[in-house]
Amino acid sequence: MSAPQSAEQSAAQSSVLRPGDERERLRARCRTAVERAIDAGADEAEACASANSGTSVQLEKGDLQLARVKESESLGLRVFVGGRIGFASTNQASSDTSLAQLARDAVTLAKLSPVDPSAGLLSGSRIDPRPFLDQPRAWDIGPERVVDWAADLLGRIRAFDRRISVDQGAVNFGRGSSAVFSSIGADAAESDAGLSASLFGMAIDGDEVGGFDSRGDYARNAEGFEARLERLAREFGTTVLANLGTGRAQTYKGAVLLAPAAVLDLLVEPLVGALSALAVQRGRSAMAGKLGEAIAASAFDLVDDPTDPELAGATGADREGAPAVRTPLVEAGVLATYLYNARAARIEGRASGTGHAVGGPRGVPGIGPHALVLGPAKPSDEGQLDFGRDELAPRLGRGLLVGRFSGTVDPTSGDFSGVAKSARWIEAGAVTGSVGETLIAGNAYEALRAIAALSSRTALLGGRCRMPWALVDGVSVTAG
Amino acid sequence: METHPDPIDLLSSALVGREQGFVELRLHRKRQRAVAVEKGRVETAQSTEHTGVGVRVLEEGTFGFASTDRLDVASIRRAIDQARAAARASARLRTRAIDGMAPADLARGRFEVPGFAETEARSLDEVLDLVLRTEARARAGANQVDSASAAYSELLEEKAIVTSDGARAWLRHVRPELRVGAVARSGGELQRGSRSVGVTGGWECLFRATSADGLADDAARIAVDRLRAGYPEGGRKRVLLSPALVGLLTHEAIGHTVEADFVMSGSCAAGKLGQRVASELVTLCDSGASEYADGAGGTLPVDDEGVITGRTPIIERGVLTGYLHNRESAAHFGVAPTGNARAWEYQNEPLIRMRNTYIEPGNSSFEELLAGIEDGYLLDGPANGQADANGEFMFGTQEAYRVKDGVKGPLMRGVNLSGRAFDVLDSVDGVGREFRWDLGSGHCGKGQPAKVDAGGPWLRCQVLLGGRG
């Protein structure tokens, strides 16, 4: 599939470091930055660096719009001085002089901050990368091959149905390495490379413009990527074509059927936000005090699994260099743990967190999951777009199917309100057509307990997570 | 910029010998200072800088883009060569060549929005004091307030833009913002209130309408009031939208659908130029300037293609009159570029984005507008929003007040509202005379973030509310 490369491209590729060499270079930069911070007066310091490169081919207006080659590098330095925090980040830290200046900036910021007794790092140790993050399989992919894939994806869309309009999309290849090093032992580095594709658009039939939808996919392996593009084009095309010819839903309060994207937006993301230990400690989590309690229907098993190589967030270490391991969050509906980074752990006097520090070199670490899996880790069979609909619609009988949710979920109260997109009306357990201008409202935390059923298989959502379909009761539906 | 005595000279030097076709060079230095406090603890005190040169070329009818974080002639020339190679690689598979770049009023010289030097010189002590004091005030706002947070950030941006067809511009501006949140508790129930403000300019501009204390008091009040508030009814309702929500309406319901790239893909605004799409009371514009009031958060004297910005009418007295363009789409439509090409950082290519989007003020007083609602709602407090290709939009509100026979009732919990953009604008039967920008904090997302603003007067119309049944 790949075409001969130009001289410029060959030259550019020849300068690409091997993964191990790039990690060692970043580790050395981090070590130097930490040393400069200690020299500048820090009690403790942590540096995080990343180097990324790749090619992105943007699709727009149904054509190849722009090809972008990318190289970037950043380094972030977090320091603690007498219980005070400071952080500085730059992409201009190529020399030891600039690292020393970055260290002085971070220490200056820290000295101005008020004292916080719980501020500081947790001790760490060296973590070697998982095998697939040590020598990534897709490390060397040239720009021409990415262009070919982008054209291939567009061709598949056109062949599927000429009424489909791709407003925006992309095929991307990215590779990169990252490293974390601290003055009290954290030392982790890994490399990763992957391919992704996305589509955003709608179907247009005469004067009728259908509602948009978006789909994406991700792979760490170039083998079989064409087949993934074919599936992506088919799923996207099927959905946006079905968005044509919208009818009117009916207003009611009761059960709705949520597709995997809606399950993620309406149920899982608010819950995961409430599981942040900092949210609990700060009094803004509805899950405070509920460890060991049933918070969801018994079918609800939520796991964070950074060991799953099919998920983009797979990693061996978190943003602070702590081990990232498979962590059950909710088991049979019972809350199993909160998520901790070092800061949240220190506030509670814990010796370690749960490996859920997230973010990059451009900011202080936050808290979040790496790779969520809800329900059985059994994936849908290829080509079974509506596996969960066919399984659960008969149980709904009559009502609304929500393809995705466009609205607001208040993470504090759990209240949600918004538009049901790519929505369908179901009668006698079967889809009768697309519906528009339909709003849904309810409470996400009440909805967790009102889950009547989850599908027996899951969908891989853009490489981010695995989600099932869900039948949820107690939702208010307002038809326009 | 410290790295070169004159960034325009640096870019111009890099361009010598590589001018063939269209080449656009943008040196973008972006610094951010941010402080966040929650429940009395400093979560972050940080400064970041990301600087580099973005290179876009138009070659063989398609665009190529590359970037470098090294600020020297050799590195920029290497990026130009990479961008050319990328363009050539995709040109062979492009089905329709890009028409070219429309001629434009290209900027030459220095452009500066007031407030940069003052904000840059402000001490971190002062910033920390503001954020700590604001958070403490929100937390002390009522007995039921259990937790509060305050976060301040400022984006200091300096850009040099040089193009092979004549732009030679340098500009700088600063965009500070303050966000305050409060969480109130009653038994096991939690409710959140928030307020935020963001501008292009200095602190005097940031706090021109409401002080930091006022934002803290509002956030605490909303959180507490929502504890005892009921839910609005769902259905199609006559509503009075606050200036902030009018801003969301203009941005989500109309603004995105008239971005010319979206129009070319077939948005609901395609083919409607010259047609009546709204009530005669509605005149809707997007502007790089801060019309009617200073400090709008998307203010931009020159866009990232080097085009001088101005006021762009979109709907005039109910008739659709224009789209938002970059130089590529302007060439396609045979019109002048409108200065809407914007890139978030040096690593990003310019996209068609809104700046400050608004509905022009009318003649009605607030009282007259309220009196005209027999049975409906007054809505305020913007949350997130989204637009669809078919014109169906949604956005969230924090506060809803039942209105009966022209009288405002107690606070109810916010809801999301929806409708078809042109249907909603056609239903407008009252436009207020007081104008306010009120959407300058946060970002608009379209692949890249962008700082925008939106606003207008109070406005009466009919929408679909997603209440509880």
Image: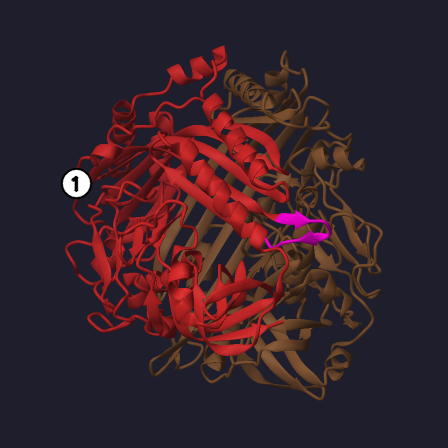
- Above-or-below relation of B48 to B83: below
Q: Does dot 1 land on a helix, a strand or a loop?
A: loop
Left or right for B133, reference B239 = left
Magenta-colored span: A203-212
- Above-or-below relation of A156 to A292: above
Asked whether the viewer can see residue B388, the reply is yes
- The amino acid pointed to by label 1 is Gly
Q: Label 1 belongs to which residue? A: A185
> For residue B381, which quarter of the picture?
bottom right
* Chain B drawing hue: brown
Residue at 65 percent of width and 20 percent of height: B60
Left or right for A226, reference B338 = left
* Chain A drawing hue: red
Left or right for B240, reference A231 = right
Specify the quadrant that holds the N terminus of chain A.
top left
**Viewer-nearest residue: A195 or B375:** A195
> For residue B116, which quarter of the picture?
top right
Residue at 58 percent of width and 24 percent of height: B93
Residue at 82 percent of width and 66 percent of height: B281
Residue A79 place in picture, x, y as percent:
29, 45
Residue at 64 percent of width and 27 percent of height: B95
Task: Count numbered badges in the picture.
Answer: 1
Residue A169 place in picture, x, y as percent:
54, 40
